[in-house]
């Protein structure tokens, strides 16, 4: 198993996933196929997604957190005259919430990232920790673009279109006016997030091959979701800018799905079914994959616990008594030597001879 | 014992993993200088650990129990249900690689399986095969593999090349903590009788004699007496430490390493001198031979063993009837005290909220455990001007400070030691920001890996720390690396000699005692190492 096989495996898997709806709708077609890809699979995927996440989170929660093990990344709370760092080393719930907000919304830990630079010449080794925020930046761009694009899609799910969608669209599409002299050539407005998402996913893919260490640790399971999301983004972009589909019909389908009276209108192009199928695979795959980091981060004991164990008791639900070597047993073994050395003892010399007799 | 290669050779490190051959297809090779000797049966037997045996990790046959796979399987299931950390950390890693170049062992060795992510993947791969649908169906393509003897050997080899320092966890966007993986992984290896003797020996000793080094009570007294004589030579004053004294207000517990070998001994002398100084101010403190170990090698064995050894501290506190406990300078000791002790063996209701008898300061942050760190105790004394200090006595030293992994990342004990340091010396220089405080580097020999036979890997793991010291050594002329950890004091001298000759290692309380001005002391011409104080070189040593 090496990176080429990993990439091929994931690449082929995603190609097959694209081909399935392409063939089934594009070549075979028919009412059954359209219901299958327009109704049954989406419902199944959403059900898998929701149930899968719930089951996984419950499964995590059922394992207790026996010890309070936050990783502290700043000064602890101690004397009033020492300034503590309540975010990176929270003392209580408030600090933990702040820490989690920074972690979840701004990827604070990833922001610390550095890159190792190792030099070795006649003066001996020299280690530098270089500036490296690209991963952090790409991760932020990727996740936030994805979020905005997801929210923009509410224009297809809801009627009338909610106000926040309009706000997002105008913010995201401020380039809609075109840049003089290129006045759009009749193209619809370009969304920044479309480009950002594709760029970020591409970067995340390229760094997996380009950075030696990351290449070595990457599994097919790392390429697969990237390819799926790339496919999702590309089909979406294609639909918007090149291969137009009947948006009214698409909206009719999605609203009917959400109203639980599903109906696939005629005239929706095959590319939409490819887009939808990629999404279905992504969300159905979600609960079984590393994508669960989205939920897992909230449960991570090194981040969501306060560093207050010295002043607030933490109980281990499965704590059990252990046998330890008692002082009495210790004194029994060393009593004579202790007395000789002038160390106070509990029992006195008589006990020595008694315990001696027992043996 | 393997010869340790010269630094020039060790420094030739290739951080680029193989291009075409994946890690799963690369079987483990157990190399001398890297691995530690297997545990001796007498040590594992002494504390009732399973499958004691005489074994050598380089042998093909590791004499595993016949049903070892079932034992590991059962052990994995058990821990999965008991530790959310384990379950979660097996599931959510995205292999972003942020941790990859943060590990001192990877930086110093280039061995790709020392990347924290891969160390955990050694485990995850087996976990996936056992517990996930994808792993069962797709096998290798899902990053899953069966557990066989080679995999177990690989686990063992790399679990004992991790010092549980948690530096990687600081950089992980999900806080995945390799220390958890290593701790639980080591528990599993122990279930089938695979441990290292450098851990099993101290555990057996600590259980019986009260400390890792196996110092018996009378010998412990002898060692303290030796310090008393030394101090008398230097100061003209005779310390009178109390041992196992009932009715004392405070019990003092510190790692035994500091009474055993230089340069920790100078720190132990520092404690004795501080206590003596404070006696007239109302300090009522006793040492104990039964609880004569602050450190806890049980923590490197299993949670249960950690709890067994840790139990002695509260037990002894109760027997002696003290009000609270003062803890010495130590790294993993404080990880256990801060994050485990009260949960393990508390609540210690027989004690009271710690209050400094000298300043009246209430240590509110130690309310539950009743354990105060000696550095915060001393910092409080300094803040209240209770110590007469002559900083210039440390003027022959240019000092830098090494944050111990555990006090930094499992506590956040960053400012107190610096405050103390600034009060006792004039020349304090920080190492570069990526190598101190929460980003501090391990000494390279923590978590029970400070044996002799694995010197090569220790020097490799110690390289990032040493390199940062080298920077301040060359830039500011730093000649003293101070720290608050007994293992640091035991191992950093080796890695300094190896990578940065000319830098010594000390504990904070050695510097405190150097600077401490006693009523009625003789003219101080020597520091605790019996070396001349600045400007005293011409003085006759009387």
Image: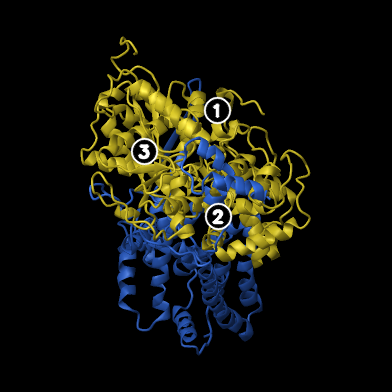
Chain colours: A blue, B yellow
The vertical placement of A159 against B455, above or below, is below
Q: Residues within 10 Å of mark 2 (few under 14, many from 20)?
A: some
Mark number displayed over residue B459: none
The answer for how far apart the CA atoms under marks 3 and 2 are is 33 Å
Image coordinates for residue B270, horizontal then vertical, percent: 37, 32
Camera-near label (3 vs 2) is 2
Please report, as a chain letter, where disc 1 is located: B
Q: Quadrant of residue B82?
A: bottom right
> In front here: B183 or B174?
B183
Circle 3 chain: B
Answer with mark 3 or mark 2, whichever residue precedes in sequence. Answer: 2
- Pick out the residue farthest to the bottom: A261
The residue where tag 1 is placed is B11
* Nearer to the camera, A314 or B372: B372
Residue A192: % across, % down: 37, 61
| Whether label 1 touches label 2, CB < 8 Å | no
Q: Would you call the spot at circle 1 few (<14 residues within 10 Å), some (14-19), or many (20 or more)? A: many
Mark 1 or mark 3: whose residue is earlier in sequence: 1
Which residue is identified by label 3? Answer: B433
Rendered view: B487 above or below B191: above
Q: Please identify the quarter of the rendering in which residue B123 is found.
A: bottom right
Have a look at marks 1 and 3 and say if they share a chain.
yes
Q: Is label 3 in contact with label 2 (beta carbons under 8 Å)? A: no
State whether residue B13 appears in this view. yes
Taking the spot 64% from the left edge, 46% from the top edge, the residue there is A356
Mark 2 or mark 1, which is nearer the start of the sequence?
1
Q: Report the Cα–Cα distance between label 1 and label 2.
A: 36 Å
Which residue has dot 2 on it?
B303
**Residue A311: x and y, percent?**
35, 58
Q: Quadrant of residue B359?
A: top left
């Amino acid at each position: 198993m090496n990176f080429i096989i990993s990439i091929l495996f994931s690449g082929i898997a995603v190609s097959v996933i694209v081909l399935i709806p392409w063939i089934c709708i594009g070549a075979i077609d028919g009412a059954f196929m359209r219901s299958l890809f327009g109704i049954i699979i989406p419902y199944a995927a959403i059900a898998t997604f929701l149930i899968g996440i719930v089951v996984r989170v419950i499964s995590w929660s059922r394992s207790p957190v026996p010890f309070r093990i936050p990783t502290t990344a700043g000064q602890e709370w101690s004397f009033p005259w020492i300034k503590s760092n309540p975010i990176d080393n929270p003392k209580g719930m408030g600090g933990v919430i702040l820490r989690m907000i920074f972690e979840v919304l701004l990827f604070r830990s990833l922001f610390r990232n550095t890159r190792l630079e190792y030099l070795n010449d006649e003066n001996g080794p020299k280690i530098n920790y270089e500036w490296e925020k690209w991963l952090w930046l790409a991760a932020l761009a990727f996740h936030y673009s994805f979020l905005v694009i997801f929210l923009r899609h509410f224009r297809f799910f809801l009627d009338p279109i909610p106000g926040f969608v309009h706000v997002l669209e105008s913010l995201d599409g401020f380039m809609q006016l075109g840049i003089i002299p290129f006045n759009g050539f009749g193209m619809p407005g370009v969304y920044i997030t479309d480009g950002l998402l594709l760029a970020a996913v591409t970067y995340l893919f390229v760094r997996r091959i380009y950075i030696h260490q990351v290449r070595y640790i990457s599994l097919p399971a790392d390429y697969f979701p990237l390819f799926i999301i790339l496919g999702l983004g590309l089909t979406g972009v294609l639909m918007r800018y090149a291969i137009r589909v009947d948006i009214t019909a698409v909206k009719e389908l999605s609203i009917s799905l959400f109203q639980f009276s599903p109906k696939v209108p005629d005239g929706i192009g095959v590319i939409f079914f490819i887009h939808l199928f990629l999404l279905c695979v992504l969300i159905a795959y979600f609960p079984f994959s590393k994508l669960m980091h989205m939920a897992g981060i909230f449960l991570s004991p090194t981040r969501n616990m306060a560093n207050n164990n010295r002043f607030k008791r933490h109980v281990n639900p499965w704590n059990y008594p252990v046998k330890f070597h008692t002082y009495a047993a210790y004194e029994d073994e060393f009593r004579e030597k202790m007395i000789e050395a002038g160390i106070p003892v509990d029992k006195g010399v008589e006990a020595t001879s008694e315990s001696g007799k027992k043996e | 014992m393997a010869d340790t290669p010269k630094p020039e050779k060790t420094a030739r490190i290739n951080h680029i993993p193989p291009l075409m051959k994946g890690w799963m297809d690369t079987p483990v090779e157990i190399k001398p200088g890297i691995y530690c000797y297997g545990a001796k049966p007498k040590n594992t037997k002494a504390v009732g650990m399973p499958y004691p045996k005489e074994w050598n990790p380089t042998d093909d046959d590791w004499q595993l129990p016949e049903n070892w796979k079932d034992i590991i399987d059962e052990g994995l299931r058990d821990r999965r249900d008991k530790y959310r950390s384990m379950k979660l950390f097996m599931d959510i890693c995205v292999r972003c690689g942020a941790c990859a170049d943060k590990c001192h062992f990877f930086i110093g060795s280039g061995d790709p399986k020392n990347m924290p992510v891969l160390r955990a993947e050694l485990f995850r791969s087996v976990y996936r095969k056992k517990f996930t649908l994808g792993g069962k169906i797709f096998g290798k393509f899902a990053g899953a593999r069966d557990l066989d003897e080679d995999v177990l050997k690989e686990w063992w080899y790399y679990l004992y090349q991790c010092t549980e320092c948690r530096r990687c966890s600081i950089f992980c966007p999900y806080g995945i903590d390799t220390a958890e993986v290593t701790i639980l992984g080591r528990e599993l290896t122990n279930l089938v009788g695979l441990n290292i003797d450098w851990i099993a020996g101290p555990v057996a000793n600590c259980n019986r004699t009260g400390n890792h080094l196996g110092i018996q009570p009378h010998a412990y007294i002898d060692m303290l007496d030796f310090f008393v004589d030394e101090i008398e030579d230097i100061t003209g004053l005779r310390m009178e430490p109390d041992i196992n004294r009932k009715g004392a207000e405070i019990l003092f517990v510190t790692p035994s390493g500091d009474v055993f070998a230089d340069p920790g001994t100078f720190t132990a002398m520092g404690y004795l001198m501080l206590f003596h100084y404070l006696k007239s101010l109302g300090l009522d403190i006793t040492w104990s031979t039964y609880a004569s170990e602050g450190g806890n090698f049980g923590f490197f064995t299993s949670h249960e063993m950690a709890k067994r050894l840790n139990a002695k501290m509260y037990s002894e506190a109760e027997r002696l009837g003290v009000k609270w406990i003062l803890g010495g300078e130590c790294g993993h000791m404080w990880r256990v005290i801060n994050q485990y002790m009260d949960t393990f063996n508390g609540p210690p209701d027989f004690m009271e909220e710690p209050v400094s008898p000298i300043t009246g300061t209430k240590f509110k942050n130690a309310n539950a455990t009743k354990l105060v760190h000696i550095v915060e105790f001393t910092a409080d004394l300094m803040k209240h001007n209770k110590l007469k200090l002559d900083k210039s006595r440390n003027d022959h030293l240019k000092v830098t400070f090494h944050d111990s992994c555990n006090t930094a990342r499992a506590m956040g004990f960053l400012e107190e030691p610096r405050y103390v340091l600034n009060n006792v010396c004039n020349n304090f220089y920080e190492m570069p920001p990526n190598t101190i405080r929460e980003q501090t580097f391990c000494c390279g020999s923590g978590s029970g890996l400070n044996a002799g036979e694995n010197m090569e890997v220790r020097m490799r793991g110690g390289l990032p720390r040493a390199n940062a010291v080298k920077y301040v050594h060359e830039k500011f002329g730093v000649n003293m690396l101070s720290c608050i950890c007994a293992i640091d004091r035991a191992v950093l001298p080796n890695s300094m000699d190896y990578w940065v000759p000319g830098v010594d290692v000390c504990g904070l309380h050695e510097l405190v005692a150097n600077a401490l001005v006693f009523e009625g002391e003789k003219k101080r011409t020597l520091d605790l190492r019996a070396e001349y104080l600045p400007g005293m070189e011409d003085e006759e040593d009387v």
